[in-house]
Every structure is written in structure tokens, then in C-alpha cells.
Amino acid sequence: MIRLGKEGGMIEIRIHGRGGQGNVVAAYVLATAAIGQGLFAQAFPAFGAERRGAPVAAFVRIAETPIRRRCQVAQPAFVIIQDETLAALPDTLAGLESEGGVMINSQRDSRALSDTFGRATYTLPATRLSLEALGRPMPNTALLAAFLTLTELLPVAGLKDALAQRFRGEVLAHNLALVCQVADATPRGIWKELVHAASA
Amino acid sequence: MTPQTLHDLRMAQPRFQGLEAGHRACQGCGQALAARLTLEESGPDVVVANATGCLEVFTTAWPDSAWRVPWLHSLFANTGAVAAGMEAALKMQGRDIKVLAFAGDGGTFDIGFQALSGMLERGHNVLFICYDNEAYMNTGVQRSSSTPHAAATTTSPAGVARMGKRHLKKDILSIIAAHHIPYAATASVAYPADLRKKVRRGIEVEGPSFLQIHSPCPLGWGHGSELSIEVARLAVQSGMFPLIELEQGALVGAMPIRQIRPVADYLKLQGRFKHLFADDALAREELAHLQALADQNIEDYALKAETADPLDTEGVDTVRRGGLRST
Amino acid sequence: MPVMTPGAFAYPATALAFKTGSWRTMRPLYQPRPAPCHSGCPAGENPCDYLAQVAEEDFQAAWETLVATNPLPAITGRVCDHPCESACNRGRFDAAIAIHNVERLLGDEAIRAGWGYPLPPLVPDAPKAVVVGAGPAGLSCAYHLRRLGVQATLMERLPVAGGTLRMALPGYRLPREVLDAEIERLLAAGINFLPNTALGREVSVAELRQEYDTVFLGPGRQRPRPWDVDGRTPSDLHPALTLLQEWVAFGTMPEIRSAVIVGGGNSAVDMARVLARAGARVHLVTHDALPGPDVTREAAMKAAPRDIRQAQEEGVILHTEHGVHRLILRGEKVVGVELVRMKKLARDNGRFDIVQFEGTETVLHVDQVIPAVGQEVEPEGMENLLGEQHFFPVDKVGRLAGQAGLFVGGDAREGAWGTVSGAVGDGRRAAAVIHAHLLGEFHDEPEQELQVIGIAELNLHYFEQAPRAEEPLLPPENRVGSAEIAGGLATEQVIAEANRCFSCGNCMACDNCWTLCPDQAVLKTREFAADGSHYRIDYDYCKGCGLCAHECPVGYIAMVSESS
Amino acid sequence: MRQALEGSQAIARAVALCRPQVVAAYPITPQTHIVEHIAKLVADDKFHCELVSVESEFSAASVVLGAACAGSRAYTASASQGILLMSEVLFNISGLRVPLVLTCANRAVSAPLSIWNDQQDSMAVRDAGWIQIYCADNQEAVDATIQAFRIAERCELPVMVCVDGFTLTHTLEPLELPDQELVDGFLPPYHFSRALDPLAPLSIGTLVAPEYFTEARHLHHAALLAAEKEIVAAARDWAAACGREQAPLVRVDGPADAKIGILTLGSVFGTLLDARDQFPGLPVKLMHLRCFRPFPVEALRAACAGLHDLIVLERAIAPGADGIVGAEMRSALADTDSPPRIHNFAAGLGGRDVPLAIYPRLLEAIKKPHPRMSAIDLRPELLPADSPVRQEAAP
């Protein structure tokens, strides 16, 4: 596990998705993973009255010291986008730090999208992977696995523990398998310095 | 006999006086009588939830209480829910105590209806008793949805342009029946033996039961205090207030009437219907309307006694030497 | 001073401290009222009392209640014309209670079971009184004196007691064994009976008055009234009473093919029936009308309706509101009578005049005319008491005017009922006064009578229609000799009748007041109810609403003003 | 041990640890997750209670009232419109002196309709005669919930635990949940001295005439004032049991000699703590009013001693008057020697985010006097052109 930039440093992540895609679950799982590793974390949805299908967002804060603030995340270090079609929406990249990173569920090539977004970008065909592994289009687990592998913010084992707290049986097994599959296929630690910078 | 021993005599009465003397009900109050008869049958192992209304006001003027049973008055509209809470608690405590809920027609038909419906729907083991005096008597005789058609109240007065209440008495029992509860019935203070029998039944069934007791109000109905039973009796004998029983929402019994009385006999004893006896076409029409409503009851519930039923409106309270009554 | 509690909770039944009695302007009172049957009974019975006991199937208690007023129930249960039943409120609801049948059954049951009168022992120095005449009045007077602890001596002119009961009542109405049983029981109840002792023969009134402080005379009416038509009478005239007494005593009757009986009383009807049964063609002619709902007591035949009906069944031809206008004689024998329509009409002065209607004359061909126009007192031994009168004028308790300690009752007094129960009543009333006299306790203030309770004062809602039990009657063709005609009722029928009783003005412990009081002001108790009810009203709480009075089925509760 | 829990889930589990026998509730955002978690615990047989799913908040409050009077510990939760629909019953419960615990997931009150967080709902029933405890974070919510049952039952008064909707109820964070024995040791079995019982049949809910009413009200008022001791005792004993210290009435954070103080209620407090670090400058004393009813006048006077400026930041207003807490602070401090200037601001109404930047804005704002309360995060550009505020704000 990497150290954050400074004492009391904090990483803020925003997850974009569509209602019903498990967006809040993704945030909760990520925070739970961090807490499981002895860190402090916060996860909460962008409170809205939106219904299934509408664009939604959720936030995660991770730090080494207790998190006291209760405001929303205005300037995330990372944005995780669960649905490529959301990328075009103005809110999706709003406030993203210039040296922040974009993790997006997409078939396309990372480099191409990096240019579009003007940020370090990593694409993952998470919908296809989840359909293969889970039989359902639930991209969040794959995206989190890739994100943690890139940043090494937390060990992938922490993610597995968090999933184990929330899921049972076959669903859990398939998710864990997917996590391993993605983690193995993702370059390790190439976003470490992004984390360091953002939390400094 | 000294007052002391008279008090001893009171303490030694061969019945349970769950509602004691000293309450402040009007002379000839039907509701006070109905409540005592109810508790006489239920005995002491009950808890009572009482809606705001005359009964609550005249029985518990602090520091006095006329009750001999555990009793709680919360509000006007929430009696069904308060009773449900009591029942839930007693169930969790594993105690076999029946919960009784008392409310007037306001607390049952109108403001208290939602809480009542919820309690019935959730199947709480509560006997809900409505003391139906057909108007908001506690606040000075304003019309309720239980007020009979054409009755005059302070908010449905009779005048040149109006013949009292323009709307019909709400058929609460049919609404209750739609909840398909184990037992629901109507009773009248004029038939105490029948009333007690129905209270007993309501207490014995597991789950929600409902009893609507026709309870004359001399003040609100405008009759002499000595006539409360007479008036209630005529309501039944004229078909204006059928005495019926329902199980799981289905009609299982109706008390037959041996000699059906004209509705006018019932109405003419009461000031609230005085305007119907004016020499006036509209009055005659409304009088006929009320008769038609009674006739419809008699038809709907087959109230006309073909034979001398032991529990018909004459037989049920035929007096016997030594107080024996057919039940 | 109360101390405020958390949430202002209150302790149970503390409202008893709040006395709502102060709200009351009218006060309910338990008040026994005379039932019509009670006030209607010449003997003074209160049927409600014993009907209640019969309803509880305690027959002996019921009989003892009954004989506290009337010692001869088996007799009166048969021969009385029971005005109690005519007065019965139930008669205006469905049908009157068959009180006479209840009375009769109790009487017969007592005879069968050999019950004795409940009597106090006679103290050695008990006061003494003498009764003359062992007819119903004398028997009753002697019995009641004995009940009251007086040593009664009963004198009778004849060798046997019974008077008219024995002399003139046919067995088909009153079987001998019933008569004998009740009279024997009565005489055996510690009464000193002296048969064959006649006034003016063995003893004089003066002697009696010397020996006793009080004397009761019950001589009855033993002498037929003289009868003629325009001063003419047939030579072979037989008064009905004489013929009847012979028939009752020896079963003999002169040969008569057809007759006119004149009169409307019991002896006229009995005479007619006896002749009719013997095969004669019998006409009964009377000024009186047939008894009926709209016929006054004065205008109606004195005979009991039941007997009149039976006489008709037995072939007697009635000519009511007719009189004999003329006797058709051949020589001194009657060959026919001319009848004329008549009517008793009330005059402004309230008295009745008999008016004949000219042009309504008709003729009957008969070989006998038998007057049964009533009897008068046989004055023998009482001449100087009677003077010119035919009856004794007495006050309402039977005291003979101007004759201290001398009482007269039964048929011998002026304005007598002319019935057995009337005589029994006279005897009882006189005995009470005599007893009071002997103790020097008689006070002559009139006790104010409570008003008899009418049907309007009952709450009929609480009673169900129920048919009256009718006793079986011997069919006319079987009515021979002394065979009793009325069959009486079975025990269960009598219990049913008792249960039909409205108990007018008498608490029946129905619990209505206790059950329906909205203020718990009525307390149920047997031992502490001094007023004859089974309840006490707690006036600390009674608000005076009047429900109990209105709902009392028997009119036992009166509402009286608090201010008065 | 620390667990990752959503606020609502933690509150639900804290309630279950207190073993109420009857829970009744009607769902309303943002309270729903609490009731859903309780329902799941019951369904999984981890919590043995009678869960009454009523047809309205009015009935929810009435059911728990009936249950508590019948001798069972009872709990309910609501928010916003639900609290207002309950309000008649809330007054009744406290007037009858019935011990109960209610969680209010604070939310704005319609109209206009808003499902988001502010504290207008619980403030609307501040005079219902309930004890009111406000939570700055979810750990406080857990601890306050457990303490609330003991306070309620010792004082025979109902307790409302106020938790900001969404910002706390829907936020997952690391939390300590006590184990059952610890809670059992702290909270004795339910006892209500006036419980309905055929063997001692009391009449509860009588009619009280004018000659007695004032005394009844006085007893209720006095009981609320006296409850302060129990609230302090509960916090002390709970700290001793689980080791988590907590200021029971007013939490004070910052230098004692600070001349500026900010008093607030609920989750905004945490944001201010971070903001103060973010924007170092003048020493500022931050205060969290945990116990709003009874209103801890003495504790507040002590906390505000020496301040020149007191900022009262609220998430509710009294339209046409002032801030609610602000007005009460004015009266509480009025007759102290040299009371501070009081600046009363609203923020975060209807769920508007309260960012760290609120802090410097507040310190800037108090440089000029604020006779009446205003919303510090008001956006004048959204107001009609003729609005005075907009014209004033225009450069």
C-alpha cells in the first residue's frame, strides 16, 4: 500500500454512472476496502431524486486520519466513469484536477481518450468483462479492480474483502474471479504518482 | 342503611362495574350505558384506548376517573393506532390481555378512520367499539358522516332552504367488512343482552373485531333523558338501525323484527327530526325518503321476522323474573 | 387537595368522590301499586303475589300466600265469577291470565297434599269472638279471627257448615268432595263450631252480646223475595231457591215439561240448567242484559258469564231485557206468559228505571213460572235488628249502625256483592276490625288508597304475546247429574299462566333498572331492599334521568319531584 | 472494532442493541434506510421485535405511544413532513410523560418540496416538549441513540435524536458499534412506572381543568430542565463503558481565549473543523450544540465567555423573525456581563452543500453588523431583479 502525499492528505474520487448501475455500491465498496485496510474513508451518493437510468454520481474520500468534513467533493483527483456515454456530459469531468486521472468503461483505446480528456486516462471494456464473468452488465467491480491496480492505492485483496462483506455465494465468487482477471491484466502502479500529487 | 354499607353494597355488586358512578355524562346518556355494558361483559383483564370525545371527557376529569380498567386517552384521530401499539407490546410481553378501543362516530367514521383501517388491515388483536351517537356531541352537536340523512345538527341545521343533513349516513360496517376481519357487528343499548353477547364474541375472536353500538344522546337527538332506550329500540324496530353480524366480511346474522314500526314513530320522539313533521311538501318528501331507507335495510338484511325467533327484537330482551334474559 | 401527577394520570374509580346526585330534580322511587286483579278481587286476594310463587314452582308457598286472604281457594277457584280476570291488564294485551284456574289448582293441590293453614298457636287467654252463620262470610270471618289469634266460635242453624255453598250450589259447579274438604280443613283449624244452633231458637243476639264483646252476623239471604204479576200468582208457584235446595239435597224435582224462569242471577241460571238437563223446555226471562264489554255491572245479569254460556249450551232459551207482562192462567194454573221488551235505563239521578216498550208483547206457552228474583234476609231471631228492612245497612268494614260490637257481612248486608268471594272478603275485613277492637287498637281513619295501575303505565315492550290456557269443558251432551263441567288446567299450563303475569305494580326483579341505569346508581340487593323491590337507588349518584322508571316493565318506579 | 457502515445501518443496529419490543415507522426519505435495515435485522432474526409497518407517521407515533404505555420499549423514526404529521402526537407523548426514542433524519419542510437536508423539521417541533439531541457525525448518532433510551426512561420523557439526512444517514464511514453485553450493562430493561396493567388500572390522559393545568405544564417543564443532569450522566457513564468521550451538552473546540466563536448544530460542525485548518488565521472557537432541548443555558454561557463575536450558523429559519437558535442565544447571553455580538446566519437550507469556503465567508461577513438573520450562502443572482438583496449585492 502506498503512502499518501502528506500527513492528513486525502484522496477524493468521484464515480459517475447511471441509476441502477450500482454506482453508490461502487463507492461504498471502495471506502469499505480502504477502511478494511485501517485507513479512514467516506462514501456517499450525490443525493438526488433521480430514477433508474439517470446520470448519477457518488463520492469517496480516503485518508490516513479521520475525515471530518461533510461537504461534497468539488475537485476529485480521479473520476471513474461507468458508462462511456456519460463522458460527453459537462458535469462528468467538472473540477477534475489537471493532474488527475480518468478511469472509464470503454472499448476504445486509452491514448485516444487521454487526448480528448486532457488527463491521464485508462479504458477498460468493463461491461463486456462483467457480462462474461457475471452474466450481467455490472462494470463497477472491474473498474475498481483496475483502478486499484493502477494506483496501488489499496491492495486488491482489500477490494476482495470489501466485496466479501457485501456479496455472498456465486455472485461473490464471480466478482472475485473478475477482480483477479482484471488485476492481472492491468499494469501495476502506473498511476502512483498521480495519487501522490493529488494528496499532497 | 348507612352510606357506608351502601358503598359496601356497591363494592359487592354481582357484576364488574368497569365504569363506575360519579362520571359526568348527561342524564340518560346512551354512551355511558354502552360503555358500562361493554366492560361488564369484558371483565377486568383488558386495556382500553379511548378516543377524544364525550366518553373520555365525562369519565376522566382530573383528579377523578370513573374507570376500573387500565385506560389511555391519547388523541381524537389515533385510537386505532394507539390500540395497535398496546396490542403489539402485550403480544411481545406474552400477556393474554385483550385490547379494547373506544371511539365515537367522529373518532371512527371520520377523523379516526385511517388509523382504524390500518389497525384492521394489519390484523391486530383489538376489539374496536364505536359508540355511535350520530354527530359530534362533544363539541356541541355538529354533523358527522354518521349523522342520518335529514337530521338537524348545528352544522346541518334545518331551515327554509334545507331539511337538515343533505347526505346519507355512512355505511361504515360495509367499509369495515371490506377489511375481511374475523368479526364485525352492530348493537344497540336498547338490547343489552344482545350487546353483551356481541362484545363477548368480539373478545373471543383472535384478530381485529369491530362493534358499532347505537347510543342515543338526549342532548343531541333532542329527546327526554328517560327516552334513550325507547328511542334506540325504535331505531331497531323501524329498520333504521339493523342489528347484524359479519364474519370475514360476510353477513352471518341479522336480528329479525317481529313487528316493524313506521320510521315516523322513531323520528317523532326526536327534536333533530322535528322539521320533518312540518306541513310542507319537502318535509313529507324527506320523511318518505327516510322510510324508504329503512325499508331498504329491511329488504337488504331480511329483517322481517317470519316466525317468533328467540332472538328477535321482542324476544331478546323480554324480561324474566329474577333478571334472567334470553341470550 | 389533589397533588398533580406526572402526565396528570388518575387512580381507578376515584370519580366516586364526585356525587352526581346533586344534578337531580326528579327522584325515582320504588313504589308498589295495586294491580287491577288485586283491587278487583272481592275477597281481597293479590294474585301477583302467588302467581310469582307459582312461576317459581313453589306451590305450597303460593297456596299459603293465597289462604292468607281466602281460606277456600278450591271453592272460589270454581264458583267465583273472577272479576280479577275481567280487570287483568293482560286482557288488553292478548288475554287475561286464567287466575281462577291457578287458584283452583292451588286449592286442589292443598287438598290432595293435605297442607294445613299456617296459623299461630292460640294463647290460653286469647280474646274471644262469635260468628253466626257458617256460610262463606261466617267461615271466612271465623278463619281470619283464628289467624289473628282470636278464639272464634262459629254458630250454624243447620247440622252442617257451608250455607248457600252447600244448600244451593249444584255439584256440576262445585263438587261436594271439594266443598267438604275445604270446610273440614277450615273447621279443624281450631274453630269452635256449634251446629244446630239457631238465633231465636237456641240463642238470642242479646245473649251473645252479653257473652262476647263482638258478634259477627253472616245469615245470608234465605227467604225468597215475594213475587207476583199485577198481584196475581199461580197456586202451584215454586220459588227457584226452594226447588234448587231440594234438588241439591235429594236430587228430586217436580215433573215439569216447560217453564219460564224469571230472574238473571246465579240461582235463576242454575234452576234453568237443572230443568233443562231434566228434559224440560226452559225459557229464562230477565230484565238484565247479557254481560259484555259495553254492558255496565248494574245492567248485566248477575250470573257468571261462564254459567250463562253453559246454560245456553245446555238448551236454555234466554230472553234478556224482557219481563213478564201478564200471566196467562187457566183457573189458577199457568198455561203461558206474555213477555214484553224492557230495558234498564239510567236516569239523571244515576238510579235505574225499568222501562217497558208497548207493542213488543209476545206469548210463551209453558206449564210453569218459576221466580228467581232474589232473596232477602230471613229475619228470625234478628227482627229487632232488621226492623222494616230486608238487609242490614253497614259501613265499609261491616259495622252495624248504632250497634256497637255488632258486625254483619256477606249477602245479608245491604249492597252485598252477592258472590262467594264477596262474602269471603266481608268476613276477612270484619275479622280484622273485630281483632283490632278486641285489642282496643281500632282507629277509624280511612287509609288513602294508591291508584290502581293501568296498562298505560306498564312498559309492554318487555312482554311477549302468549296465548291463554283454556280449561276443558264437559260437552253439553255429557253434562248429567253432578258431573263437574270445568276440567281445570294441568300443572304446566298453570305455571305458564303464572309466567304470563305482568306483575302489574309489583317488582319482578327483572334487573331492568339495574341493567339500564347509565350512572350505576341502581344497586342490586335482596336483603337491603326495604321497599319490596330487589334494588336500592344510590341517590348520591342518581341524576334523575328517569330511564329506570320509563323502562320498568311493571310500573314499579315513580318519578317524584325533589322539591316536593 | 471499526466497521464500514452507512449511517442509517449503524443507527438501525444501535437501536437493535437497545432491544425495543415495538418499532413502528412509515417510510420517508431520508429516514427510509434506517427502517429498511431494522426490517432486515428482524427478517434475519437478528432482532426480536414487533415491527409495525403503519399507514402514516401519525399512526407510527401513536403506535409507539400505545406500546410504551403498555409496558414495552418502543422506537420510531421519521423526517420532515412525517415529523409534522406526527406533531400532534409528539406533543401528546411528552405531555403524558411517555419515554420513547425517535430518530429524526433531518430534512427540509415543503413547500417548496425538498427531500434534502436541513433542520427545519425538528426545529418546527422544538416546543413539543421533547428532549432534542443533534449529532455531528454517525458515531455520535450511534452513541446518542443508545444513551437516548436511558435518558428517556429515567426522565419519563421522549427523546428525539436528530441526524442530518443524507449527509449522515447515507454516508458510509468507519464506526464503532458496541457489543450487546456492553449495551445491556448500560441500559436496564424497560420500566414505565405508569404502565397499563389490570392489576393497577390507572387512567392516563385525563382532562385537566384550568385550576390544575398550570401545575401539569410546570411539572413537564421542570422535568425537561431536570433532564440535563441525566443527559450529562448518560454521556459520562457511556464514556466510562465504551471509552468514547463526548461533551453531553455543548462541544467546544478551539482556544479558550478566542474572541470569535461559531455555534452550530449537526454535521456542518465537522466541515467547519476542517475549514479552520484549511484557512488558518484568527483563533476561532467552534461549538456544537448537541443538546438543544433542554436548552443548556449555563453550558452555553460558559462556552461563550470572553467572545466578542458569536456566529450562530443554523440549517433552519423562523421566517419573518430570525434564526431559531440565534434568537435563543441572544436571550441566553443577554444578561451576561459583556455579551458578544451575535451574528445569525443560515446555511445549507434544502440540502445546499456547505463547503469549506463557508468558513472564510462567515469571518468576512461579521465585519459588518447583521441586525437580522440571513442565509450566508444565498445566491442573489437567482433572485428577482427588483429584490433589494440583489440590488445591494450588485457591484
Image (spheres, rainbow, N blue to C red):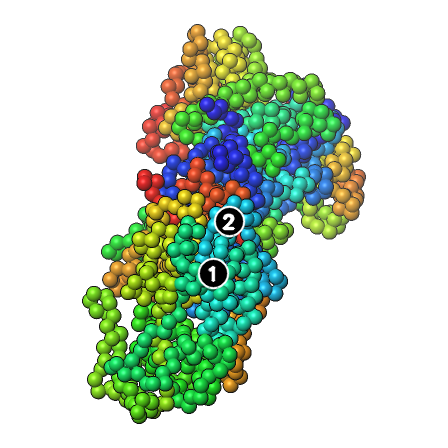
The nearer-to-camera label among 1 and 2 is 1
Looking at the rendered structure, the kind of residue marked 1 is: Met
Describe the element under mark 1 as helix, strand or loop. strand
Q: Chain of mark 2?
A: C
Judging depth in this view, the residue of A199 and D195 nearest the camera is: D195
Q: Chain of mark 1?
A: C
- Measure the alpha-carbon separation of dots 1 and 2: 19 Å
Give a yes or no on whether discs 1 and 2 share a subunit: yes
Q: How many other residues sit within 10 Å of disc 2, few (<14), some (14-19) or many (≥20)?
A: some
Residue at the spot 59% in from the left edge and 20% down from the top edge: D230
Q: Are marks 1 and 2 in contact (CB under 8 Å)?
A: no
Vertical position of residue D304 compared to residue C558: above or below:
above
Q: Is residue B257 visible?
A: no
Q: Is residue C155 visible?
A: yes
- Name the residue carrying label 1: C155
**Which quadrant is home to the C terminus of chain C?**
top left
Question: Which of disc 2 and disc 1 is earlier in sequence?
Answer: 2
Where residue C183 appears, as percent x and y from the top left, is: 53, 64
Judging depth in this view, the residue of C368 and D333 nearest the camera is: C368
- Name the residue carrying label 2: C149
